[in-house]
Image (cartoon, rainbow, N blue to C red):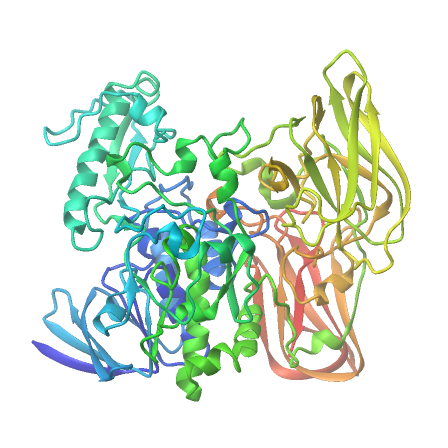
């Protein structure tokens, strides 16, 4: 057996999305880094071996897509890939190769694929000296020595071998009082899943299952227990088994049982189910996954244990390094062997297009919330971090933080912290306290979002500049028939979302404000009764776009309008209201219409960035309407919430204000955003964040997708003694974050970004410009 020793600053174990982002992040932040993975491809559950699409906060919150390294990769995949994505069902290798390409081109990062971990060597009871691995089919033992290790194995293999404390199973409700916790503690975990894919052959494709496949005969098993075969192509998350098996030790047994059930499900759809037999007549099995995707096993105890209360209450952590917003999604232990699938689906919750949320689903809706660094730091080992589903959370909290969009953000943060600790000799306690500001600022610089942090980088010269623009969009509102440009609305494909126009519950519409006087708001309404209908209205200040309180404080105004029979009608609410003087430019108002089941508030086809609507899902609580749609409204005077000053707010998505400059769509391109300083500044790097890829989850976007809002062609120029000079010129861009290192530093008082073409939108738009 050949033996090789490698020495690094940081070793990341596990190459799922958490481990991938941790390794890339660590290397990009100056640490010599190894990524050790036991599979031939990167991506873990998202890889072509498993085929789970990366879910995250944007499934439930508009403009909550995870950014940073994950976003960079997902945008690249959509731009390259010919394949349509549907939920849990895409298996070609383009995504694998995007990740592999990023890893191979990241300086300071070395990949070790097909390498199984076999143990650790301890330097002391609280410090790991090395992890030990064996290369599959190569008769080679590897020893990886490092200053800091990050366990992204999912099962917590490194932490377990190092003697760290871990939990597995479900805490009882008596321990933390969590609403979703079972009454009694148990060893129960969520299960493992495999997917299958079917393809249309263009002619009848008979299917005969093997004798050892499971035989399904009862329709209620599928249609009354939350196991809907809703896609002809397969990809069902509910093909899941855990209890009575152990998700680690019985993994092979679970894989075989899942295969038996997957074949049985397809047999039911092809040969027995009257709802699907005709639909799948020409479909044939194309692929059955044989690497189960795992939801839950060990959770390593860290320097903080995050509970469901932190999630539901949106605890503000001083060491916030990521965010989440998937719902508290706890699948029923046993999966296919249980009486129902996860409770929300069984209750008709978020998958039900026509009903409001079930009580269980409303209780489970959460976020966006912050995630603290301390849950990524092992409490029993001073040089071991974690990222992924094995972090320090309770079983109930794991229901939301376990999805890959959230775990990827954890990985990127862990990589930065590990790199700083390894290269500067900083302890975990120092990183989580004295150094947390720098870690947070690096995350923001890398394009990440933190709900309670903004760019305060003292090195960013843009923060002391004055911003101006060649034009700015005026927002008069939007009508149902207004053509849509933003975010490719017409090609969205995703889970059904509530988009009922009838006012069966309270409805709210955000309006970006420019302050001053508000004369009136008009709503586009219909009344399908024979009598005039009264609708009560309220106008509120919203703290941010995810302020889901039904009544966020005392209203600025309240009133009533009368809707004549028929319609659509533009119904005016006269206000003559002086808005608060302290209102920030671009901050959001929210106009609410209270329930009246005879009245419909019509949805627009065009989306105004940040101007999402919401509806009540329970007393006192609302959620996103549709896919982040804008309801039809008009406002007078026209608002200007997208001024040039928005690029200097330090936040790169709609949140407490629009945080976005948008040029006047009536003015032709090119359009420019300019920064001006009182005295000349020496600039060596310019960084720009463009809009797009925020409003919905990744699998909502089409093949070869390039976001319409994102500038395609642009250049950066500076005014020098000899006049304006082009510093950078870019063609065919589709990425959100672009960094430009200048060939030579330039000294200037004025710098501008000139957008000459977008990927389809008539306006030029920019979230942020940084100068160093």
Residue 615's spot in the image, x, y percent?
Answer: 63, 37
From this viewpoint, which residue is outermost toward the front? 174
Query: Measured along the vertical axis of the image, is residue 130 above or below residue 135?
Result: below
Which quarter of the picture shows residue 650?
Answer: bottom right
Q: Name the residue at the top extreme.
A: 530
Residues 102 and 704: in front is 102
- 652 lies left or right of 291: right
**Residue at (29% x, 65% y) in the render:** 166
Q: Vertical placement of 537 versus 698: above or below?
A: above
Q: Residue at x 43, y 31 (%)?
A: 347
Above or below, 247 relative to 216: below
Q: Check the picture and name the quadrant holding the N terminus.
A: bottom left
* In-front residue for pair 534/523: 534
Q: Among all residues in the image, which is located at the extreme right?
A: 576
Residue drawn at x 33%, y 17% is 278
Q: Position of residue 440 (x, y in %)?
A: 55, 72
- The quarter of the displayed image where residue 465 is located: bottom right
Q: Nearer the viewer, residue 754 or 74?
A: 74
In the rendered view, does 190 fall on the left or right side of 248? Answer: right
- Judge whether residue 515 can be spotted in this image: yes
Q: Position of residue 620 (x, y in %)?
A: 64, 41
Residue 135 as seen in the image, left or right of residue 197: left
Position of residue 70 in the picture relative to residue 604 (left or right): left
Residue lying at 47% horizontally and 80% vertically, measured from the top left: 431
Let me know if residue 324 appears in the view. no
Q: Residue furthest bottom?
A: 425
**Dividing the image into 4 quarters, which one contains the C terminus?**
bottom right
């Amino acid at each position: 057996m050949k033996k090789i020793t490698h020495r690094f600053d940081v070793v990341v174990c596990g190459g799922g999305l958490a481990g991938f982002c941790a390794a890339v992040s660590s290397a990009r932040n100056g640490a010599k880094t190894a990524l050790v993975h036991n599979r031939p491809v990167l991506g873990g559950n998202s890889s072509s071996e498993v085929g789970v699409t990366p879910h995250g906060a944007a499934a439930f919150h508009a403009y909550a897509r995870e950014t940073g390294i994950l976003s960079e990769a997902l945008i690249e995949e959509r731009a390259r890939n010919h394949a349509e994505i549907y939920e849990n069902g895409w298996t070609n290798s383009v995504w694998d190769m995007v990740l592999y390409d990023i890893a191979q081109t990241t300086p300071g990062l070395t990949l070790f694929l097909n390498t199984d971990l076999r143990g650790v060597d301890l330097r002391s009871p609280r410090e790991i000296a090395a992890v030990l691995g064996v290369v599959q089919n190569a008769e080679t033992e590897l020893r990886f020595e490092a200053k800091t290790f990050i366990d992204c194995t999912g099962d917590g293999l490194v932490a377990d071998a190092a003697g760290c404390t871990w939990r597995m199973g479900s805490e009882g409700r008596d321990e933390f009082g969590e609403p979703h916790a079972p009454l009694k503690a148990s060893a129960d975990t969520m299960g493992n899943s495999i997917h299958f894919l079917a393809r249309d052959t263009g002619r009848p494709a008979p299917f005969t299952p093997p004798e050892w496949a499971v035989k399904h005969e009862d329709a209620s098993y599928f249609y009354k227990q939350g196991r809907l075969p809703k896609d002809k192509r397969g990809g069902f998350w509910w093909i899941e088994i855990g209890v009575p098996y152990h998700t680690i030790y019985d993994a092979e047994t679970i894989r075989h049982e899942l295969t038996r059930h997957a074949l049985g499900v397809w047999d039911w759809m092809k040969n027995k189910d009257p709802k699907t037999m005709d639909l799948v007549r020409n479909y044939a099995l194309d692929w059955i996954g044989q690497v189960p995707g795992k939801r839950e096993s060990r959770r390593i105890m860290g320097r903080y244990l995050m509970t469901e209360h932190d999630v539901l209450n949106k605890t503000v952590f001083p060491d916030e390094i990521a965010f989440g917003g998937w719902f508290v999604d706890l699948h029923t232990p046993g999966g296919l062997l249980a009486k129902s699938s996860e409770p929300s689906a069984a209750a008709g919750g978020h998958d039900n297009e026509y009903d409001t949320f079930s009580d269980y689903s409303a209780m489970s809706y959460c976020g966006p919330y912050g995630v603290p660094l301390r849950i990524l730091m092992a409490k029993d080992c001073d040089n071991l971090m974690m990222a992924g589903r094995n972090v320090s959370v309770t079983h109930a909290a794991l229901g939301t933080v376990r999805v890959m969009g959230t775990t990827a953000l954890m990985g990127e943060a862990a990589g930065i912290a590990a790199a700083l600790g390894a290269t500067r000799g900083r302890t975990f306690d120092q990183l989580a306290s004295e150094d947390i500001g720098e870690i947070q600022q690096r995350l923001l610089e890398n394009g990440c979002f933190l709900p309670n942090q903004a760019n305060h980088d003292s090195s960013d010269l843009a923060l002391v500049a004055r911003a101006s623009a060649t034009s700015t969009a005026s927002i008069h509102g939007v009508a149902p028939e207004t053509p849509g440009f933003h975010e490719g609305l017409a090609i969205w494909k995703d889970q059904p979302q509530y988009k009922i126009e009838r006012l069966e519950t309270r409805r709210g519409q955000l309006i970006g404000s420019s302050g001053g006087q508000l004369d009136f708001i008009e709503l586009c309404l219909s009344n399908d009764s024979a009598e005039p209908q009264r609708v009560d209205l309220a106008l509120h200040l919203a703290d941010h776009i995810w302020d889901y309180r039904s009544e966020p404080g005392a209203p600025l105004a309240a009133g009533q309008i009368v809707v004549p029979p028929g319609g659509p009608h533009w119904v005016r609410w006269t206000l003559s209201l002086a808005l608060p003087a302290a209102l920030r430019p671009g901050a959001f108002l929210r106009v609410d219409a209270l329930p009246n089941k005879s009245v419909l508030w019509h949805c627009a086809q065009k989306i105004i960035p940040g101007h999402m609507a919401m509806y009540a899902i329970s007393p006192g609580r609302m959620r996103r309407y549709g896919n982040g749609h804008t309801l039809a409204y008009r406002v007078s005077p026209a608002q200007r919430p997208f001024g040039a000053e928005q690029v200097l707010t330090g936040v790169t998505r709609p949140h407490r204000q629009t945080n976005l400059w948008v040029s006047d769509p009536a003015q032709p391109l090119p359009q420019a955003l300019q920064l001006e300083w009182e005295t000349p500044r020496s600039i060596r790097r310019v960084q720009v964040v463009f809009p797009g890829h925020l409003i919905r989850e990744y699998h909502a976007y089409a093949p070869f997708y390039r976001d319409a809002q994102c500038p395609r062609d642009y250049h950066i120029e500076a005014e020098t003694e000899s006049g304006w000079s082009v510093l950078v010129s870019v063609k065919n861009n589709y990425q959100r974050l672009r960094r430009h290192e200048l060939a030579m530093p330039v000294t200037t008082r004025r710098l501008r970004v000139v957008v000459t073409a977008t990927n389809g939108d008539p306006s030029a738009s920019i979230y942020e410009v940084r100068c160093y």
